[in-house]
Structures are given as C-alpha cells and as structure tokens.
Image (cartoon, coloured by chain):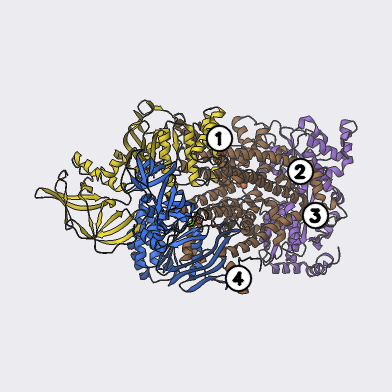
Chain colours: A brown, B blue, C purple, D yellow
C-alpha cells in the first residue's frame, strides 16, 4: 500500500480499503481487461497445454519403445528419443536428411512465393495492367484449392514410367517420358507449393504497397534515380516488414506441409520432416513423431524471432505518411498486354491446369487413356456404361460423398463463426490494451496454433478431450471437438485480421458512443462489429477455406458419421478410385470458390468490403 | 457556481507523469479553453473529466456530484456522466448515415420516436445540414462532417460539452467560419464548454477563460485579454500571438531617478512603477506595437527591412535591428518598403519585462496595468 | 497384468474370455438386437461393404464402420482407451506386433471365437487372436510382356536390369508391408540358400548387415526401389497392358482380380525362390469394454461366415447377393483371390488354384515382436542413404 | 526571359478533364504561386512540369529546352529534367538517415565526396538542422522533417524549384515562420520557383505572381496586390482574404448625375468612373475596410454586434446589418462592443462591384485604381 508513493504522505492520502476495492471494481468493469484475462486463460488451456503435452511426450517412454527399452515402463522420463533422433545411428535417416530436404524445399518455395507474390502485388496494385480487380480475385483462387490438388494434377500429368502403369498425360500426348527430376522430387514439390502459397506474399505485399506513398518513388525520380534504383533503394526497403511477415507465414506453412511432398517425394524417396512425422506416427512411434513435430515448432519460432530481429525494429517505416498521400498508377506502356497474358498463363498453370485434369480424371473410364471414347459421366450422374465400376455409385446418390460434404460445410461454417467471434474479441482486447502484457501475450498465444504441426495437434487433442478437461465434458467423438480443434487451429487467421481491422478503428469511435451513454454490448453490436466486419470476414473466409480441405488435423478425430470431404477424398485416393477422387475434389473446389465469391459479393453489397 | 471541479488531479502513464497535480474550477455556462503545445496534457485533462481516462489520484466533481475520487474509490464511468464530447477526428460512425449518427444515443436511451425526429430536425437545422440526413459520413466534406459531430452534440442536449481540437482538421478559412459558429452555438446552448486546442487564435477568439498549460502544469489562467496583454511568463508570451512576440535582451537601469531600459545604443524611458531590480532583463514587444517611422527620432533604432509579407489586411515585416531579428506588423497591405532608411520605435507602455532567470513577468503596479489597457 | 475387477466384471457381463462357456447363440442374437448398434474400427474399406451386408441380415442393428487404415485403427483404440472412452465394439486390423503384443495384453481387445467355429479353424489362427483372413503380398510381373516369369529367384530383383523397376508400398504407415519385410528377414537362411543356389557362390554380406534377409533389403533398396503410397496403383503399374518395360512389384495379391475387372495382365511367379508369396493375418477382435458386446460377437461371427458354409457349398458371383451372401455372410465382400479364410471348410475363391500349393513365407508373432522396430529402422536408414 | 513555359497543356484522367487548356509563362527567378481550391488542378500542373505526369497534349519548355511535346512525341522523364521538388508529404525516405536523404541525388550524380560533404553541411546549416544528420526522419518533428525536405532542395542546387503545399502539414505558427524562411531562401537562391497552395495567405505573403485557378482554368494572374485589391471576378474575391470578403446585393443607380449604390435604405455615393450599367449589382467590401462608428452619419447603417473575436492584433466582429451578416475587422484587441447603438459605413472607394450575371468585376477607369491604392 505504501508502495504507491503519493507526493505528500499524509494519512488521508493513503488509499483506503474502499478505494482499493473501487479500483479493483473499476478494473473489472473495463470489459477489455476482463475479457483479456478470460481469453488468455482459455487460449492458454487450448494452446499451451498441447504444447506442454507435446514436449512431455518427447521426454517419456512410449509404448512403442518397448523394443528398445525393454526395462522401462511407459510414462517414465527418458532422453531416449532425443538421442535417437539427434545423435543415434538413425539420426541421419530419421532427422538430418529430411530436415535438410525440408529446408531446401521450404527455402526455395518461399523464395519463389515471394517473387510471384510480390511481383503480382506490384502489377495489380501499382500498374495499369488490364482488368485489375478481376486479376485480384483470380490470383487468390490457387489458395482456395487444397495444396495437394496441384500435386495430384502434377503427377497425373508428368507421371513417367518410373512408377509404371498408365502413362501420364504428358507421355500420352507427346509420346515422351518426362525425366524423373521433372516428375518427382524437390523440383515439382517446390513448384507445386509455390503455386499454392504465393498468395500469402501477394496479400501481405499488396496491402503494404497500397500504404507506400508513391511520392517516395517520385522523390527518387526527382533526385535522378532510375526506375530500377527507385525500386531497389526506396520501395523495396519500405516493403521489408511486409515481405518479412510474408516470408515467415509462407515458410512455416511450406515447411510443415505434408500432402505435396508425400505425393511427389515418395517415388524417389525424397523425405521431408512432415512425411517423417507421419511415418513415425504411422508406426505408432509417437516419441519420434512428437519430437520431429517439436523441431518444426522450434524452427518456426526461430524464424519468427530472426525476422523480428532483422526487420521488426523498422516497423514504423510505412506509417509515416501525412496529408497529401498519393498512390500513382504506373503506366506499363507496351508491356501492359504481354504482362497480362503472362499472369493469365500463370493462373492457367496454377488453377485451370489442375482443375481440368481433375475433371478429366473424374470422367475417364480407364486411367491413362485420354481418348474421347474413354469418357463417361457415370461417376457424376450415374447411368453406368461399359467399363465403369458399377459398384461405385455416382455422386448424385453417393451417400458417402454427400454426407461428408454436408459435414464439411457444417464444420467449416461453424469454425468460421467461432473463429470470427473469437478473432474479433482477441483483436478487440489486443488493440484496446495495446502495450500491456495481456495484449502481447494474447497476440502471441493466438498465433501459436499456426506453428503447431496439424497432425501432432490432433493427436494431442484426443488425449486432452477424451476425458473431461477442466469444466469441459469429454468431447471425444463429438462434432463439437472437431469444431473446437479447427477453431483453435485457424484462430491465427481471424485474430490477425481482427487485430488489423480493429487497429483501423479509431478509439474515439467507441468513446463517442461511450460518452453518449451507450453500453459496451450495444457499442460492439452497433458500431465496432459492423465496422470491423469487412476485415473479420476475410479472416473467416480463410478459416472456412482451410477447414474445408483440412485433413491431417482431424483425421484422428473424425468418426464415420463426422467424416469430411477431404477424408473421403483421402480414402478414395487410398482405394485407387481416381474418378471419385476427381468428383469429390472438383466438388470441394467448387464449393469453396462459390462460397468465396458469394460472400464477397454479398459483403460488397452490404458495404462491408471484405478484402 | 462551479460546474466542473478538478481537485489535485494527477495522472501517470506508467512512469511518465502526464499531469503532476492539477486544480481547475470551471464556472457554469462558461467557455473555457485549455491551450498549450502538443503533449502538454490537454487531452488527458479533458479525458479525465469525461471519465475516458481514470486519474491516478484526485477528485472530479461535475455539477456538484463527485464522479471520481481516488480516496473514496468512486468512479462513475463515462456512459453515466452525461457529457457531450467532440473528438478531433469527429468520430462519426462510418457505417451509419448522418441521421443515425445523430440519433443513435437517443434511440439507445429509448426516447420516443417523435422526440428523436424533432431533435434530429432541430440539430440539423442548427448546423445547416438539413437535407443531408441520408448521406454516409464518407460522402460529406470535412466541414460537413464537423457539423455532423456538432449536431450530434446538440441533439443530446448535455449541459457540459467537451471538445478536443474540433477544428484542427479544417483548412484556414473554414476554421475561421466554424469558430464563429461554435461561439454562436455556445451562446445559444449556454452549456459549460471545455475546449482543447493548441491554436492560440482559437483560444483568443472563442474563450471566456483561457487556461495555458505546459507539461501538465497550468501556467496562467485568465481572460483572453489578460493572457494576451499580461502574460505571466515568457512561455505564455511566446506561445500567444502570431507572428510571435519579439523578445530582446536589455539592461534595466535607473538614471537620475528615471528608469530606462538600455537596448544596444538606445535608452527607452520607462514608467517608474516597474518593480524589477536593475540589471539584465528580457523585454518583449508584440509586432503590432512596434512603430515604424521614416525619420530618426530620439528613441528610435535604425532597422533594415528583410522580408515584407502582406497577408491581406496586414503586412508582416521582418526587420534586422542591430543584428537582431525583429518582426513588425502593420495594419495595411504593403508590398515593399525601402530597404534601409527605416527607423523603429518601441513605445514604452507596450513593453513587457521578464526576469532573465525565472522567465516570470516583472509586474507593474496595479494602476499602471489599466493604463496599458487603454492604449 | 494385474487383476482388474472392472475388466473382470465386464468380461463376465459380456461372457467373454474365461466366461465364454456354453454359448447360447440365440441368446447372443437376441441381446445383440437389444443393443441395437455395433461400432467397428477397421483397417480396410471393405468393411463398409460388410456393414451393408450385415444390415441386410440384421436390420435391427445399426452398424457404424470406420475405415481408418491399420495404423490409425490402432492409434484410435489406444488413444480412446487411454482417455477412458470405450466407443468401439469390434477392432479389425492387421499388424501382429500391435494387435497381439500391445492391444491384447493391455485389454484393449479380447479374443473372441464363436464357439461353433472352434473346430473348424486351426489353432494357430484362433489363438492368441482370431484371424479373419489371411492375405498375402505377392511379387507381381506383367504376363503380357513376359509370357514366362522374368525371374527365377527373388535376388534377381537386385540386378541392374531391374534398377528403378521394382516398386512397393512404403512400410512406414503400412503394418502389413512391414510384416512382409519381417517374413523376409525371419527366413534369412532360406534367402541365403536361394542366393547360393542361383548364383552358385557364397553370399557376401555388406558391412554392418546382419543376415541374408537384411542383405536382400539392402540390395533391393540400393537398386533404386520405387516407393509408392498405394498397393492398388502398384498393381496397375505392373499389370497394365501394352508396356514395353513394365516394372515388377510387391503388391497385395487380391489385386489379381484386376485381371478380370480391368483386363490387366498381372501374374505371380509362383515358383520363385525362396517364395513369391508373403502372407500375413488380419485379425478381428472384440474391443475391450465394448459397449455392445453381443452385437460385437454377432458381427465377428458374421464376418467369419455362416454356420452352414462348408467345403461343398455352391457359391456363384456376385457373391454379395442371394444364396451366396447367406452362406458367406461377412466373407462375401472378401471372397476373392488374395483374401483367404482360415476356416478349413470354406471353398477357395475363384482363380486361387495356386494358393494352397504355392510356397509362402510368414513372419511369426514372436519374431515380429522382437524385430519389427529394428526392421523398420533398418528400412528407414537404408532408404535415406 | 521565360524559364518555364506551358503551351496549351491539357490533361485528362480517363474521362475526367483535369486541365482543359493551360498556358503559362514563368519568368526566370520569379516566385509564382498556383492558388486554388482543392481539386482545381494545381498539383496536376506542377506534376506536368516535373514530368511525373505526362500531359495529354501540349508542350512544356524548361529553360529553353522542350521537355514535352505531344506533337513531336518528346518526353524527357523526370529523372533527367534536373528539377527540385518538395512534396506535400515531404516524401522523405524513411529508410535513410537525414544525411542520405539530402545527398542521395548528389551521390547519384557522381559528385566527388568532398563536394557532397560541403553541400550537406551548407544545406543543414541553412535550415538550422546541423547535428541532426544522423537521425531517421521518423525521429524528427513535423517542422524538422519539413526542413529536411528543404535542405534536400538546397543541396541539389536546381535552377527550378517546385513545391506542392510544402507547409500544409505544419501548424499555424510554424507555418508563419517557415513562410519567412522559404521567402528568404528564394531570395538567396534566386531559383525559379513554382509554389502550389490552397492557402491564400501563403500566396499573398510569398509570391511575385499569383495564378488563381479553378477547375483547371486560370481565373486571374497577377501580383498579390492586384489579386487582393482588384479581383477579376467573384470567385477570386471570395477566395482571397480571411475573413472572407463581404458580398452584398445592391442597386446601381444614377441620381442627379451622381452614381450611387443603394443598399437597403442607404445610398452610397460612388465615383463616376464606375463603368457598370444601372440595375442590380453585387458589391464587395473587405472586412478591414468597413468603418465602425459610434454615431449615426449620413451614409451609415445601423448594425447589431453578433460575435466579437479578438485574434490578437486584430478583432473580427460579426455584425448583423438589416438581416445581412457582415464581418468587420478592426486593427486592435477588443473583447466586447456594445451590442446595439453601432453604425457602420462602407467607404465608397473601398467597394468593388461585380456583375450579377457573369460574376466579373465591373472595372473603374484606370486612373481611379491608383487612387484606391493609396487609401
Ligand atoms: N495512452 C498513453 N500512454 C502513455 N502516454 C500517454 C498516453 N496518452 C498520452 N500520453 C502522454 O501524456 C502526455 C500528455 O498527452 P496529451 O494527449 O494529453 O497531450 P495533448 O496536450 O492533448 O497534446 P496534442 O496537442 O498533441 O493532442 C504526452 O506526453 C503523451 O505522450
Ligand atoms: N491519378 C488521378 N486519377 C484520376 N483523377 C485524378 C488523378 N489525380 C488527380 N485527379 C483529378 O484531377 C483533378 C485535379 O487534381 P489535382 O491533384 O491537380 O488537384 P489540386 O488542385 O492539387 O487539389 P488539392 O488542393 O486537393 O491537392 C481533381 O479533380 C482530381 O480528382
Ligand atoms: Fe495448405
Ligand atoms: Mg490532444
Ligand atoms: Mg494537390
């Protein structure tokens, strides 16, 4: 009490108990503080406990370890996994080589993503390339496709005789077998990942370019700098923070991505960390699996840290504009149309190419034969015909696909809602308590799920929610658990957009309502939510998209009645039913794109304007 | 009667003490301006009154009711203080049309529809925006947005109005006009108004009382006349007045019973009532009080014309007097003056003296103040 | 394992394990119908078809069959049980190591053999765990390109002409593939003999390699083996007609059926030394603490085929309908070459004339228990070289 | 000699014609201000001169060299025109320290290191920023940033300087001071300067020539004196002067050979040299020219005092005259006036007349203009 050194220590200046109570009451009547504490606790339980569990599992004897540690009891403390993974005879195979491969693909893909993303952002935001708003929508579509779609398409197209059987479309049409290095391994992995994940760089850089005053470049021109030097010395450094965050986001996603390396790496035994995690989990070697997952987590943290060290200090660059801001459109001159065509070609490669192949795949009777007579609509509308698998019902009465579609939609929708609400609340608390410990902690914790490998996250959630967890009843096997884990995993999307959206809203907008006697809840409903809706909605769309195609996160948690579309596709893939893989994937993509376009159209109409 | 009372208010942000200890009484119905440079704590004071910021210690009494007291742990949140507030950014809600912006608080307070309608119409009429009720704020010009913010205030009919630099986003001419309108509005509503600005012209033109602040400490409090003519210290003297007041170093002397101030080679006789001791002194003269003469007089100083800047009704003349830069202001449009052959005079009754150490004004005896007022 | 009263109580209530005496089959059926539901975790998608067939016979009982793949079936059971959730009734999976040496002793599952079948199944397929079907990996070649088997001994696959032309499913994530590798390693003396007979010289082990079984794997991988994620694709790759240089592969032999359905040209060199077939069992068991034990029993019995089924039963395709279904019951969906019932009284499915005669290698449960992790590690180390 | 020549420049953005057709000659060494309301095309004009924007048609000649001609397809890009430019937002490069901001152009032009060092020191000294060379722009105050932008200009030593509202981000007092400094700078550098602003005070105080624009069309071009005293039309009259000029509707009549203007019940005798025909007319009088008298005179009008606003050296008085709002300006500090019992007079030689239809000024005969100038 005496610690609050009042200038004059007369007894009346020492706050009374009542005063302290009043202060406390005031503290808790500030909704953002109370909310902050509640959110921090809930998120802590949902995010930090799994992280703790992950670490704990790597340090204990697992049932699988019996063969190695005959005397140990499962659950005992051990450093066995660390020795085995990092120093043992197998560490090269188990860890170092995949780790190295991971770094190679991830760095290369990140670099290409950055080049694509930043280039497109510049073209679409700054230049007079034709049909800009159309292009803006178009370049986001690759992100809506599941990333393995591209890989499947790639292998369908470039498959050579290494894995034998039906030839790929390339060999079929051109009569030449593509070499192994084009068909499998690091190069196609890098290309496929790049064509998918460049969207992060695009979004980050394009919004940053918009906020760079083009007068900076013009001042460069007045100083006699050539176009190139203007870009290198002025624009590029200003974009550095955006580029940095794009690099982090992309790298983490790419290095943790499983589907594409699994499809394209396996035939030439090109393993990366996620495939090793999957393999370890598959042989029930949870200790190794979790430890490798932990490596990914640490790698991501390291990356974030380095990025902040290198770039974080200069965050203030872009916010430096006052009155007289200008965003000038650069005239591409005669390059206008050629560049437009180039972009369209890129989009054809990233969007049309896989989609067309998938549609084709869903229509073909016998794999590898692309002649017209080999096509059938059986798998879409039934009707049978010669050479089709009569036992597989067509989409229209394939309960399997239809139920799963329904589940997927329900799951993605509920997740989007949940993350929308929580992203908003987190954004609100983080922005309103900016500078405080609560704010920083919350922001960090809300981002953590992003760096958590999905498979390990799912495995740990089973353990946590199979029995009552705190006040929460055992959720295992319920749909609610799926919604929960999906919400937590995709929370980074909405919390980031939520924070960004709320930062745009001047505090005074809320205070103006406050002094007029409008209570907290009404303020949220009437003012803050409607204004933040645009930004939030784009975050929710991201959640929706990623859950629609999510598999590794929930594969251990789904039950037949809660199976999702991605799971069905996975099963068909395993059962080698390419037609139904095609049907279900096309369906999935169609849903995602449609929902996206509809939501955007509606929000524009409602003056919300999702980015 | 005092409508707003701040007692011993302190406010710290972390380790930074924004308000060391503030006492302020604002009489009912008056227009009080908090004036000071950026970061001096004006906004903080206003927000403490509104309850948007909780003071660290002290007491706030509004209309006789204690709304904050650190001793008794009282804190009435802003939504129950019933104040009107205009923000620098206007804080119009971009998702609502003008009418909704003005009436939201009324409809949230469950006022009957016809009351809301009446008040809306009245408020719009007062700010001359009738007919624009159906626009979004983004479809209005800066000046119109400002008027909507005012209309919102009018419709709420609060007895205390707080305004935080409401005109700072407008351009010069519009500001001149809105100043007049806000002043007129205050006369009509008779609401106690606390107005924050760092623009001294706004403070001079609109206020009943000006409170000049610096680093959270009140420097001077008084009518515009007092503040302009009898600044309490160098800080206030320099802060008020555009172009800036001329500050010169002189030497106070008593020659044969007469007090004079010696500046370079000129000696200016002074009224004997000046209280300061002999020795070095800073004296100040406002640009408009410098007399420019075309012939050398007994107390005149030779000056060289540097820059002549007509602003319309006045002309600012930058002069060099014995190596010192001096600004004069004459009440007419002048595009050029002869560069040399110009003399200036400092009328003795227009000089203000400041202690070189403390920067505080050296007072005259009371009767003499009246004399300078008549000048 | 210590005595566990709760476990014991459940066994008693469900009449399983030591309490499974004088089984009254009608009572089981009645109770099963009362329970009204059965939840099956299965490593194969075929179970979904079985579920459909089961529903035809017992419409009162709702079947929830989960196709999870072998590793996830086990993962799910273990995780659920660890968390005290008892959702599954029937667990169906391969993977001797886990099923026999982890799940069974830890009371995650309990062995159940319908009493009326006891004398129709050889003991090794009843104990410690009931085998539902015996499946096998076979070495596949393309009989269109090669009218005669292109190799005589398995060692030829390590020769340059098969470089990059032999594929198999990755054992990481496929317990059955791992079982095949285990069979090769366990029978390393036969592997060695085959080598020495064919090449007429002593097998020289590479440095650090323990025996002929490992040596074979070492050389096979060194010969640029192609790893695939999917056996069906492998069968397609080998058997597609019109290929000039088709690869060879390890594949599940029930894909031989593709020869009929899709006109592929897959064949197995049955005379291969030491063997062309590597068999492994797929187990079915009642889950520990199953909520619907009677329905589980009924489902297990259904899977094994009806009482009336015998060696002379007349079975006609399509097997999953009519009289054949009535007889085969749960076997109907499996009734094809490559999946063989352990029952001595079931007629062999079509095109499986060679099955009884052909030489098969099988890994024994004990060997698997002690060596499977080592083999898995060996594989990993070798493929990452 | 003309340093900058624009011939028949048009500029359209898509379908929007920002500059319909502009001709402008700017003499070497002069300080020319483009003045006009927002969106009138000032910035566009400046950017066309700089080459940052390419005109749609026309010709730009800088220092005798054609740098743009739509007819001959000539276009010299900005980086090779060798101009200095200050942007409204200063456009300092936030990733470079002050010294690099100032010297980038020099090092780009491959100047030897010692020259660069000298020029940097000189430029910093001129803008009084010596010692801050090692800061990032974000570590400077608004005024300091502005000075860096000026220093960048000084160091480059271009013979043509273009400035786009360089003072608009500063607050009032700082602006007054920077105005003087820019003016002094111009005198020292003798560079041809084109200055864009929408602040009429800036234009009046700094320019040799003011070009008033509206919707891309030049309304009037002349010295500050001409623009202020002889506005070409109502638009210019209203745009120039703060507080705004008073515009009143009167009736021009000829009574017994004398010309008078009748306003309400007063008749004000006029010089006969006024050229307009009898009939309704708009007449204008600047606030500072209204005479306030305390006794009714022959041509005086009774007025009611509405608001009194002292700005320091002056006081703005808002009056109501027979229902019309009139603003007067007196050159002293006044806090109150008697509300009634006030009369005002419009000195005949201070009135300006505008045609009610076209809004153009009704001229006097030339000799009389000189007379009004002496007043
Ligand atoms: N939320 C805050 N956290 C920390 N310091 C603050 C905060 N708000 C204000 N301050 C500091 O308190 C002091 C007073 O700030 P205040 O906003 O009251 O100044 P002001 O007089 O309104 O200035 P301006 O004219 O720039 O608006 C400043 O030094 C400011 O940096
Ligand atoms: N890049 C552009 N694209 C389309 N229209 C433009 C562009 N730049 C300017 N305009 C339009 O051209 C007209 C003139 O603009 P300009 O910027 O020259 O005005 P200004 O006089 O400088 O105004 P301000 O005082 O607001 O800076 C305006 O109507 C403006 O909307
Ligand atoms: Fe992805
Ligand atoms: Mg403030
Ligand atoms: Mg402009």
Q: Quadrant of ligand 5?
A: top left
**Which of the numbered marks, if any, corresponds to residue A490?**
none
| Of callouts 4 and 1, the N-terminal one | 4
Whether label 4 touches label 2, CB < 8 Å: no
The residue at which mark 4 appears reads as A13
Q: Is mark 4 within 8 Å of ligand 1?
A: no
On the same chain, marks 1 and 3? The answer is yes
Taking the image as shown, residue A569 lies to the left or right of residue B219, namely right
Dot 4 lies on which element?
helix
Q: CA distance from mark 1 to mark 3?
A: 53 Å
Name the residue at the right extreme.
Answer: C202
Taking the image as shown, residue A418 lies to the left or right of residue C106, namely left
| Of callouts 3 and 4, the N-terminal one | 4
Dot 1 lies on which element?
helix
Coordinates of residue D84 in the picture (x, y in percent): 45, 34
Q: Nearer the viewer, mark 2 or mark 1?
A: 1
The residue at which mark 3 appears reads as A62
Along the viewing direction, whichever of A82 and D126 lies nearer the viewer: D126
| Of callouts 3 and 2, the N-terminal one | 3
**Which of the numbered marks, if any, corresponds to residue A95?**
2
Q: Chain of mark 2?
A: A
Whether label 1 touches label 3, CB < 8 Å: no
Q: CA distance from mark 3 to mark 4?
A: 62 Å
Taking the image as shown, residue A440 lies to the left or right of residue D239, namely right
| Of callouts 1 and 3, the N-terminal one | 3
Dot 3 lies on which element?
loop
The residue at which mark 1 appears reads as A232
Q: CA distance from mark 3 to mark 2?
A: 19 Å
Q: Chain of mark 3?
A: A
Q: CA distance from mark 4 to mark 2?
A: 65 Å
């Amino acid at each position: 009490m005496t610690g609050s050194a009042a200038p004059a220590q007369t007894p009346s200046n020492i706050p009374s108990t009542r005063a302290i109570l009043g202060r406390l009451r005031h503290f808790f009547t500030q909704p953002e503080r109370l909310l902050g504490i509640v959110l921090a606790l809930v998120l802590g339980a949902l995010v930090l406990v799994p992280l703790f569990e992950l670490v704990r599992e790597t340090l204990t004897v697992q049932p699988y370890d019996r063969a190695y540690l005959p005397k140990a009891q499962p659950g005992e403390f051990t450093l066995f996994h660390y020795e085995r993974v990092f120093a043992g005879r197998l560490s090269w195979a188990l860890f170092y080589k995949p780790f190295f491969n991971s770094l190679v693909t991830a760095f290369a893909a990140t670099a290409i993503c950055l080049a694509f993303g930043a280039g497109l952002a510049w073209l679409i935001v700054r230049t007079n390339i034709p049909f800009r708003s159309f292009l803006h929508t178009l370049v986001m579509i690759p992100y809506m496709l599941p990333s393995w779609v591209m890989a499947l398409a790639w292998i369908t197209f470039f498959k050579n005789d290494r894995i034998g059987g039906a030839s790929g479309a390339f060999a079929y049409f051109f009569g030449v077998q593509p070499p192994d290095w084009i068909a499998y391994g690091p190069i196609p992995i890098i290309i496929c990942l790049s064509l998918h994940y460049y969207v992060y760089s695009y979004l980050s850089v394009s919004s940053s370019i918009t906020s760079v005053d083009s007068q900076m470049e013009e001042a460069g021109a007045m100083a006699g700098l050539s176009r190139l030097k203007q870009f290198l010395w002025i624009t590029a450094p200003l974009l550095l923070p955006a580029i940095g965050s794009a690099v982090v986001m992309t790298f983490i996603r790419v290095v943790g991505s499983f589907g594409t390396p699994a499809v394209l790496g396996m035939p030439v035994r090109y393993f990366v960390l996620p495939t090793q995690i999957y393999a370890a989990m598959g042989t029930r070697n949870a200790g190794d699996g979790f430890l490798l997952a932990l490596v990914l987590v640490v790698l991501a943290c390291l990356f974030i840290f380095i990025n902040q060290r290198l770039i974080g200090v200069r965050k203030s660059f872009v916010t430096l504009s006052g009155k007289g801001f200008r965003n000038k459109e650069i005239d591409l001159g005669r390059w206008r149309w050629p560049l437009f065509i180039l972009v369209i070609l890129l989009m054809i490669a990233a969007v049309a190419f896989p989609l067309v192949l998938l549609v084709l795949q869903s229509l073909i009777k016998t794999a590898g034969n692309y002649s017209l007579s080999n096509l059938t609509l059986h798998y879409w509308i039934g009707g049978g015909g010669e050479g089709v698998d009569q036992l597989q019902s067509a989409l229209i009465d394939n309960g399997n696909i239809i139920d799963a579609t329904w589940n997927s939609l329900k799951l993605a929708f509920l997740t989007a809602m949940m993350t929308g609400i929580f992203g908003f609340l987190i954004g609100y608390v983080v922005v309103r308590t900016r500078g405080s410990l609560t704010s920083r902690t919350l922001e960090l914790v809300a981002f953590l799920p992003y760096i958590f490998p999905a498979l390990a996250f799912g495995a740990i959630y089973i353990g946590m929610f199979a029995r009552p967890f705190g006040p929460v009843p055992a959720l295992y096997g319920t749909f609610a658990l799926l919604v929960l884990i999906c919400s937590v995993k995709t929370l980074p999307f909405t919390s980031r957009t939520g924070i960004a959206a709320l930062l745009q809203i001047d505090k005074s907008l809320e205070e103006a309502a406050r002094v007029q006697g409008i209570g907290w809840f009404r303020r949220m409903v009437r003012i803050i939510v409607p204004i933040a809706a645009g930004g939030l909605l784009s975050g929710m769309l991201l959640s929706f998209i990623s859950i629609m195609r999510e598999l590794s996160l929930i594969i251990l948690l789904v039950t037949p009645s809660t199976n999702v579309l991605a799971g069905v596709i996975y099963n068909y893939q395993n059962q080698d039913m390419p037609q139904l893989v095609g049907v279900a994937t096309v369906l999935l993509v169609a849903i995602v794109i449609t929902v996206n376009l509809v939501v955007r159209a509606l929000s524009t109409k409602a003056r919300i304007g999702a980015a | 009667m005092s409508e707003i009372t701040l007692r011993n208010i302190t406010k710290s942000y972390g380790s930074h003490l924004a308000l060391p200890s503030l006492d302020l009484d604002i009489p009912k119905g008056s227009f009080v301006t908090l004036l000071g440079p950026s970061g001096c704590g004006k906004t903080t004071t206003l927000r403490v009154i509104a309850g948007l910021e909780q003071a660290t210690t002290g007491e706030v009494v509004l209309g006789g009711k204690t709304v904050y007291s650190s001793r008794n742990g009282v804190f009435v949140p802003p939504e129950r203080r019933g104040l009107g507030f205009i923000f620098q950014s206007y804080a119009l809600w971009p998702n609502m049309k003008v009418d909704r912006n003005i009436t939201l608080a009324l409809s949230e307070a469950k006022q009957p529809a016809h009351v809301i309608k009446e008040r809306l119409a009245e408020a719009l009429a007062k700010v001359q925006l009738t007919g624009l009720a159906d626009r979004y704020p983004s479809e209005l010009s800066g000046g119109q947005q400002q008027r909507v913010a005012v209309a919102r205030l009018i419709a709420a009919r609060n007895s205390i109005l707080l305004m935080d630099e409401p005109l700072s986003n407008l351009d010069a001419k519009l500001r001149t006009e809105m100043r007049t309108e806000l002043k007129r509005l205050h006369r009509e509503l008779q609401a106690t108004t606390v107005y924050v600005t760092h623009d001294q012209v706004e403070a001079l033109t609109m206020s009943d009382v000006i409170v000049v602040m610096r680093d959270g400490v009140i420097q001077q409090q008084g009518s515009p006349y007092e503040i302009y003519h009898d600044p309490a210290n160098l800080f206030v003297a320099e802060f008020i007045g555009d172009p800036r007041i001329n500050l010169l170093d002189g030497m106070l002397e008593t020659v044969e019973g007469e007090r004079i101030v010696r500046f370079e080679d000129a000696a200016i006789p002074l009224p004997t009532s000046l209280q300061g001791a002999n020795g070095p002194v800073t004296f100040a003269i406002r640009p408009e009080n410098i007399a420019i003469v075309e012939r050398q007089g007994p107390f005149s100083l030779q000056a060289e014309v540097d820059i002549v800047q007509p602003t319309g009704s006045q002309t600012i003349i930058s002069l060099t007097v014995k190596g010192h830069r001096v600004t004069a202001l004459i009440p007419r449009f002048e595009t050029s003056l002869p560069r040399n052959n110009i003399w200036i005079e400092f009328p003795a009754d227009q000089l203000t003296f400041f202690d070189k150490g403390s920067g505080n004004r050296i007072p005259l005896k009371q009767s003499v103040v009246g004399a300078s007022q008549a000048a | 394992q210590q005595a566990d009263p709760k476990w014991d109580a459940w066994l008693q209530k469900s009449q399983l394990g030591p309490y499974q005496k004088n089984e009254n089959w009608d009572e089981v059926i009645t109770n099963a119908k009362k329970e009204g539901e059965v939840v099956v975790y299965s490593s194969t998608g075929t179970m979904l078809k079985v579920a459909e067939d089961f529903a035809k016979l017992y419409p009162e009982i709702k079947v929830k069959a989960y196709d999870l793949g072998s590793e996830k079936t086990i993962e799910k059971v273990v995780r659920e049980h660890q968390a005290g959730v008892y959702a599954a009734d029937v667990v169906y999976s391969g993977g001797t190591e886990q099923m026999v040496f982890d799940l069974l002793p830890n009371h995650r599952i309990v062995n159940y053999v319908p009493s009326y079948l006891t004398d129709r199944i050889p003991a090794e397929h009843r104990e410690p765990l009931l085998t539902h079907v015996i499946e096998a990996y076979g070495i596949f070649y393309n009989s269109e390109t090669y009218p005669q088997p292109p190799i005589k001994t398995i060692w030829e696959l390590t020769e340059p002409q098969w470089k990059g032309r032999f594929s198999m499913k990755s054992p990481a994530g496929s317990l059955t593939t791992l079982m095949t590798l285990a069979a090769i390693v366990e029978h390393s003396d036969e592997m060695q003999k085959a080598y020495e007979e064919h090449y007429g010289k002593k097998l020289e082990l590479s440095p650090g390699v323990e025996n002929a079984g490992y040596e074979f794997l070492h050389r096979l991988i060194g010969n640029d083996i192609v790893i695939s994620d999917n056996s069906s694709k492998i069968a397609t790759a080998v058997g597609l007609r019109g290929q000039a240089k088709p690869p060879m592969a390890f594949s599940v032999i029930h894909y031989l059926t593709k020869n009929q359905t899709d006109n592929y040209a897959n064949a197995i060199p049955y005379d291969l030394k030491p063997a062309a077939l590597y068999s492994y069992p797929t187990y079915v068991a009642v889950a520990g603490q199953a909520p619907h034990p009677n329905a589980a029993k009924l489902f297990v019995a259904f899977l094994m085929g009806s009482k009336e089924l015998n060696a002379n039963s007349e079975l006609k395709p399509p097997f999953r309908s009519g009289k054949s279904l009535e007889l085969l019951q749960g076997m109907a969906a499996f009734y094809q070459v490559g999946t063989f019932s352990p029952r001595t009284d079931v007629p062999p499915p079509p095109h499986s004339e060679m099955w009884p005669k052909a030489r098969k290698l099988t890994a024994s449960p004990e060997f698997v228990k002690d060596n499977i992790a080592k083999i898995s590690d060996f594989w990993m180390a070798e493929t990452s070289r």
